[in-house]
Image: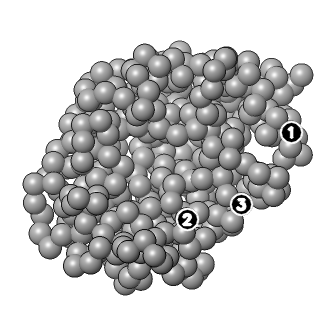
């Protein structure tokens, strides 16, 4: 399904979370599934209790909540373990170096699936009857291939194109089933899918090391990069965000695979990136601006930082608040629970004042 068709589907489903007026939400539904002046999270949060995490998201991000991830619980709750839990007919196990493809399902694979099931149970309980947006996240095929070891080698799966293709097919099928499960649990929610590709730049630039550390895995063909990422994105049939590092070299890949929006850390932007980012925005894609935590950050400064990026792109100020969502620069698993909640609330407040700043 193409980007326009997915957006039409989202618009048809669009309903509004508690406190939203139909008028205010409809303004954002003209082009994007979120209302103007919106914030959301990246995915991970501190702590080990899925009910507490779901309640924190419910309170802090009422316009655009997401399914929390809690990596502090250990292997299986991390982003690689969670994605591995979705794989169909491919199994994984924990090794001294991380995760490896296994010949049969074992304790590690079952634990990863149990963590995901517990998170979904908590989400269903806290968000029962939810009628607004809801974002779910999954690690993309290239980050997964760079992180998983081959079954009989210490080299990453990335080094075997055939294995990469199998992983992408398995992940696409598993992610589609995962999204369908979430939709069944919360049938009135409008689901947004975020594909996490923090390693896409390293893969595209040839910076993923071999097992020895002395060499680098050969750069995949760019068309192959697009095909495998696009395979996963189109499998969701929902509005899809790709979260990656802000590297201009990857913008073209993301723009060519049918992604509806791009999520990035704005502190990593360099001068050549702004033209590429402007092209992404002009193509009608949503932009999720990740703002890093720093001392003295307040809602006004956060909103000003986002506004400055938009101005450097040279685009119409009127579109910024409609097209841009504010997020943390990355997951918040390393923060304390209080600090994580404070950050999310700060960004939500910053998002509400962004339209006024852009008008000024």
Task: Tell me if label 2 and label 3 are in contact, CB under 8 Å.
Answer: no
Q: In x, y percent, where is residue 260?
A: 61, 54
The figure's colour scheme reads: one colour
128 on left or right of 200: left
Q: Position of residue 82 (x, y in %)?
A: 30, 50
**Which circle, 2 or 3, is nearer the viewer?**
2
Q: Disc number at residue 311?
A: 1
Spot occupied by residue 336 in the image (x, y as percentages of width and height): 40, 22
Q: Which residue is drawn at 51% across and 55% down?
A: 198
Q: What is the crowding at mark 3: few (fewer than 14 residues within 10 Å), some, or many (at least 20)? A: some
Q: How far apart are marks 2 and 3 (CA)?
A: 12 Å
Picture residue at 60% right of the left edge, 70% below the top: 205
- Would residue 329 appear left or right of 303 to someone viewing this image? left
**Which label lies toward us, 1 or 3?**
3
Does label 2 or label 3 sit earlier along the sequence? 2
Give the label on residue 222, or none: none
Q: In this view, does 336 lie above or below 115?
A: above
Res. 62 visible in picture: no
Report the residue marked by disc 3: 248
> Image point 78% across, 26% down: which residue?
304
Q: Residues within 10 Å of mark 1 (few under 14, many from 20)?
A: some
Instruction: Identify whether 271 is placed above or below 328.
Output: below
Question: Residue 202, which numbered label?
Answer: 2
Please give the name of the residue rendered at 62% of the width and 47% of the height, measured from the top-left corner: 264
The span from disc 2 to disc 1 (Cα, nearest Å) is 28 Å
Q: Tag 2, which secondary structure?
A: helix
Separation (CA) of disc 1 from disc 3: 18 Å
């Amino acid at each position: 399904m193409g980007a326009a068709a997915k957006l039409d589907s989202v618009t048809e489903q669009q309903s509004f979370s508690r406190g939203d007026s139909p008028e205010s939400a409809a303004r954002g539904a003209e082009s994007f599934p979120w209302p103007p002046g919106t914030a959301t999270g990246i995915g991970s949060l501190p702590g080990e209790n899925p009910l507490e995490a779901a309640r924190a998201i419910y309170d802090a991000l009422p316009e655009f909540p997401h399914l929390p991830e809690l990596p502090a619980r250990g292997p299986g709750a991390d982003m690689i373990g969670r994605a591995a839990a979705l794989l169909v007919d491919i199994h994984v196990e924990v090794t001294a170096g991380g995760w490896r493809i296994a010949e049969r399902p074992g304790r590690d694979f079952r634990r990863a699936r149990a963590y995901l099931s517990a998170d979904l149970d908590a989400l269903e309980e806290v968000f029962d009857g939810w009628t607004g947006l809801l974002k779910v996240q999954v690690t993309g095929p290239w980050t997964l291939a760079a992180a998983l070891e081959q079954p009989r080698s210490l080299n990453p799966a990335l080094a075997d194109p055939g294995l990469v293709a199998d992983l992408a097919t398995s992940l696409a099928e598993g992610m589609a089933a995962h999204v369908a499960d979430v939709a069944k649990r919360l049938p009135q929610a409008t689901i947004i899918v975020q594909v996490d590709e923090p390693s896409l730049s390293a893969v595209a630039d040839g910076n993923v090391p071999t097992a020895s550390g002395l060499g680098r895995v050969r750069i995949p063909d760019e068309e192959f990069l697009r095909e495998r990422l696009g395979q996963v994105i189109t499998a969701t049939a929902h509005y899809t965000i790709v979260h990656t590092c802000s590297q201009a070299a990857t913008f073209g890949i993301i723009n060519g695979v049918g992604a509806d929006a791009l999520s990035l850390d704005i502190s990593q932007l360099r001068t050549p990136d702004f033209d590429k980012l402007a092209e992404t925005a002009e193509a009608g894609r949503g932009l999720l601006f990740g703002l890093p935590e720093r001392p003295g950050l307040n809602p006004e400064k956060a909103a000003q930082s986002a506004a400055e990026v938009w101005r450097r792109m040279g685009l119409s100020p009127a579109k910024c608040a409609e097209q841009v969502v504010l997020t943390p620069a990355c997951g918040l698993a390393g923060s304390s629970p209080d600090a994580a909640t404070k950050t999310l609330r700060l960004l939500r407040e910053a998002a509400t004042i962004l339209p006024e700043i852009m008008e000024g």
